[in-house]
Amino acid sequence: MIEVGQTVDVVVEHGVIKHSSIQDISNDRFVLLQVVPPLPVSYIGKIIIITYLTKKDRRIRHGFQAIITEICEGYVTVGRGFPAIIVKSISESEVCDLRTHERHANRPEIRIQSGTDTLDFTDISRSGAHLVRDAGGTPILKVGDTMSLTISIGNFQYDRQARIIRQWHTKGTDGPEHLAVIFTEEISI
């Protein structure tokens, strides 16, 4: 079951996932910490999917649909105010998967390059990939940036633009940089 303080991933539209946390719960009403960049008030009335991992089994993702009822700058709880997204649950929580296409693990016949740099990757699908770069890689990239990739799979080569949708480091900021990207055009894999 979802709890106050729990980290969640919010699907705000197809392929766009934002990180947040549950700040308050009252029956079927949930208060989420505003995402970065903030959702504008035009999202009020939009249906989103809130997904989370349970403490019991961190490998199984659960989720439910909710409608955004309010976006406010100063929601107050426990004596402090913060920007918030207030939603009303419109479905039961059930097991879900954020993936829309089957993922394929790194294989020797697949190579991904950005310019002259060969990038390591954890997995790739028709619509995106989980790339890994050495810490301090150049150019400096951030969520929302687009990068040019050349993807070689056996005898096939695809030149694609890829938009960064998530970015994180393992082992602190000195560790490898991970980039979740979506391709502007799908590939055959």
Image (cartoon, rainbow, N blue to C red):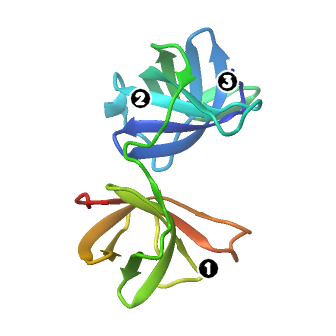
Label 3 neighbour load within 10 Å: few <14, some 14-19, many 20+:
some
**Residue 181, visible in the rendered structure:** no
Label 3: state its secondary structure. Answer: loop
- Residue corresponding to mark 3: 2
Residue that appears at 62% across and 8% down: 27
Check residue 149 in the rendering and tell me which mark sits there, or answer none. none
Residue contact between numbered discs 3 and 1, judged by CB atoms under 8 Å: no
Amino acid carrying label 2: it is Ile
Q: Position of residue 180 (x, y in %)?
A: 47, 60
Whole-Å distance between the Cαs marked 2 and 3?
16 Å
Label 1: state its secondary structure. Answer: loop
- Residue corresponding to mark 2: 48
Label 2: state its secondary structure. Answer: strand
State whether residue 158 is above or below residue 78. Answer: below
Q: Position of residue 53 (x, y in %)?
A: 65, 34
Q: Quadrant of the C terminus?
A: bottom left
Residue that appears at 26% across and 70% down: 160
**137 displayed left or right of 139:** right
Label 1 neighbour load within 10 Å: few <14, some 14-19, many 20+:
some
Q: Quadrant of the N terminus?
A: top right
Q: Position of residue 118 (x, y in %)?
A: 45, 84
Whole-Å distance between the Cαs marked 1 and 2?
33 Å
Q: Earlier in the sequence, mark 1 or mark 2?
A: 2
Amino acid carrying label 1: it is Ala
Check residue 135 in the rendering and tell me which mark sits there, or answer none. 1
Q: Earlier in the sequence, mark 3 or mark 1?
A: 3
